[in-house]
Image (spheres, rainbow, N blue to C red):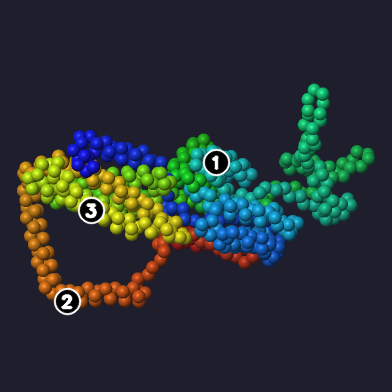
Amino acid sequence: MIRWFAAHPTAANLLLVLLLAAGLFTAPSLKRETFPDYRPVEVSVEVVYRGASAADVEDAVCRRLHEAVKGVEFLDEFVCVAQDNLASATATMQAGGDPLRFLGEIDTEVSAISEFPVRADPPVVRELHRSDAVAAVAVSSDMPAGQLEEYALRLEERIMALPGVAEVAIHGMSQRQWQVEVPGEVLGQHGLSARELARRISAQSLDLPLGTLETPERDILLRFTDQRRSLAELSRLVVMSDPAGGELTLGDIASLTEAGEREEEKVRFNGEPALVLEVSKSLRDDSLTVKERLEELIEAERRRFDDGITLTLTQDMTSIVRDRLQMLVGNGAMGLALVVLVMSLFFRPRLALWAVLGLPAAFMGAFLVMGLAGLSLNMITLVALLMAIGIVMDDAIVITDNIAAHAGENATPLEAVVAGTRQVLPGVLSSFLTTASVFVPLSFLAGEMGAVLEVLPVVLIAALAASLIEAFWILPHHLKGSVTHLQQGHGSRFRTTFDRGFERFREGVGRLADRAIRFRHAVLGLVFTVLLASVGFMAGGHVGSEAMPDIDGDVLEARILMPQGTPLERTEAVAAAGRGGHGRTR
C-alpha cells in the first residue's frame, strides 16, 4: 500500500482532500464549552408548605420523603434542606444507572406519599442539569414595578423564542397577589368572620366549565365566568345585600392592594431596583452561538425603547469558554509556527512544510471522530490536540529524516521514499500502540474525574490514527518530488554553516556520553540520588495534589447569612452596609 500510494499520481492527494474536507465539514458543528458535562444525574423534589417553620417542614415533609425514596435502585445520596415554608430535596444517582428509570422511580415513590400535611402543595419532581447557564439580562427603568414586570414577562417570551434557549428564570419578581385587609371591628359590625368573608369572595369569583348543552342543531359549551381580574372588579364584589336592594361591596369595608407574595424577593443592580432574567441553553447547543443571538436581541430591544428601559448583559458564563479556547488555539498556532521554524533548520523548508502537513490532517481526522462521537471542543479535547502536535511531529520527523537518508544512497525517488518509510514502519507503529496503551485506560475511570478525562484518549488516538494515515500513505508521495532536490544538493551558505555547527555540537554530545560511560558508576549513583531526593520531596508533602485545579475567575461573590426569622428591614440594612463597604474598596 505504501508503494502504491507513493507511485499513484492522484490517490494520495485525493485521500488528503477527503480527510481535510471531512474534518472541515464537521468542525463548525462541534459544540464549544469549558469542560465536558461531568455532573452526576440528580433529581430535585420541592414541596411548598406555607406557614410552617423549618422544624415543621423537616418533620412533616423531609422525613417522609427520605422514607419513601430510600429503596430506589442506584440511589447514591438523598439530601433534604428544610426552610421556612419550603422543603428542597436532591437525589443523586450512582454511576451505571439509567437516568430515565431513576427519575421515574423517584417520581413514583414521591407521588405515592399520602401523609403530607393538608396545607402542603403537591410535590414538584424535576431532573436537574438539563441546561447550562449562558448569561443574564438585567432590566431596570423608572417605570412602575407592575409595568416593569409586564415588560420582563414579554422579554422572557422573546428570549425563549431564540434557538437553543432552554430556560429563562426571572429573579426579583415574586408571584403577584391581591391583599384584602378588613379591620376586626368592621367585620363584627356586619356580623362577618374572616372565614365567612373569604368564602363569599371565593364563591363570587369563579371561572368554571358547566358542561355541554345538547340541542338538535348543535352542542353548546357552557361556562360560568365571573372571575375578578382587577382590583377595581374585586372592589365591586357584593359582600352583603338586603331585600330593599341595598348592597355592601368589598371596597366599602376593605382596603385592597396588589403586592408580591414574597416581599423579600428583590434584586438591585448597580444600586437600582431591577429584574434579572437568567438565560440557560440546552445541553446540545453551543453556548457562544446562543450568547451571540441573545446580544442581537438585546441590541434590538435597546433600539426599540431608546432610553426608556436599561438592558444590561451580565453574568456572562461564556467568557470563560471563549477566553480558554482562544488561549489554547493561540498556543497551538504558536507551537505550530515554532515546529515549522525548528524543522526548517534541520531539513529543507520544502521538506519541513510537507512534514508539518500531517498536523492539519491529524486535527481534521480528530474533528471527524469528535463529531461522530458527539464530543465537544473544550479544555480537555484541546489539550489532547496540543499533546498530539508533539507526537505527530515526532513520527513525521522520523519518516522525513529516514527518507532524506535514503535519498543520499543514489536510489530513485520512488525507491527512496518507499524504503525509508518501510524501514521505520515498525518503530512508528510500536510508538502509536505504546501511546494508546497508556491513554486508553483513562476512558474507564469512574466518577467525575472519569467523566472529564474519558474524552482525552478518544481525541488523542483519533488524531494519531489520522496522522499515521497521512504519514504512511500521503507523506511519501509528497516527499518523492523533494528527493530529487536533495540528491542535487545546492545547499545555501546558511545551511552549510548550520550543518557544520550542529555537527560540532553532536560531536560534543558524543564525547560527553563517552565520559558518562567511562564513569558509569558515579553517573548511576547520581541518578539514584536525584531519584531518592525527588521521592522524599514528594513524600514530605512539599508537592500538593488535587483532582481538578481551580479555574481563576473574575467574579467576586459575597453572601450574608442571617438567622431564621430576621426581619426584612434588618436584612436590607446589613446588605446596604455591605454595598457601602464595596464602594469604598473599589
Task: Pinpoint residue 395: horizontal percent, then vertical percent.
Answer: 23, 52
Horizontal relation, residue 220 to residue 480: left or right: right
Report the residue marked by disc 1: 160
Q: Name the N-terminal-most of marks 3 and 1.
A: 1
Task: Pinpoint residue 72: horizontal percent, then vertical percent.
Answer: 61, 59
Q: Amino acid at mark 3?
A: Pro
Vertical placement of 532 versus 400: above or below? below
Q: Secondary structure at mark 1?
A: helix
Horizontal relation, residue 284 to residue 539: left or right: right
Q: Amino acid at mark 2?
A: His
Identity of the residue drawn at 28% across and 76% down: 532
Q: Amino acid at mark 1?
A: Met
Vertical placement of 8 versus 486: above or below? above
Q: Name the N-terminal-most of marks 2 and 1.
A: 1
Q: Are marks 2 and 1 in contact (CB under 8 Å)?
A: no
408 and 135: which is toward the camera: 408
Crowdedness near tag 3: few (<14), some (14–19) or many (≥20) residues, C-alpha within 10 Å: few
401 and 319: which is toward the camera: 401
Report the residue marked by disc 3: 426
Q: Nearer the viewer, mark 2 or mark 3?
A: 3
For the residues labelled 2 and 1, the Cα–Cα distance comes to 73 Å
For the residues labelled 3 and 1, the Cα–Cα distance comes to 57 Å
Q: Nearer the viewer, mark 3 or mark 1?
A: 3
Crowdedness near tag 1: few (<14), some (14–19) or many (≥20) residues, C-alpha within 10 Å: some
Task: Pinpoint residue 353: horizontal percent, then vertical percent.
Answer: 20, 44
Image quarter of the N terminus: top left
Q: Most extreme residue toward the right, as rendered? A: 243
Image quarter of the C terminus: bottom left
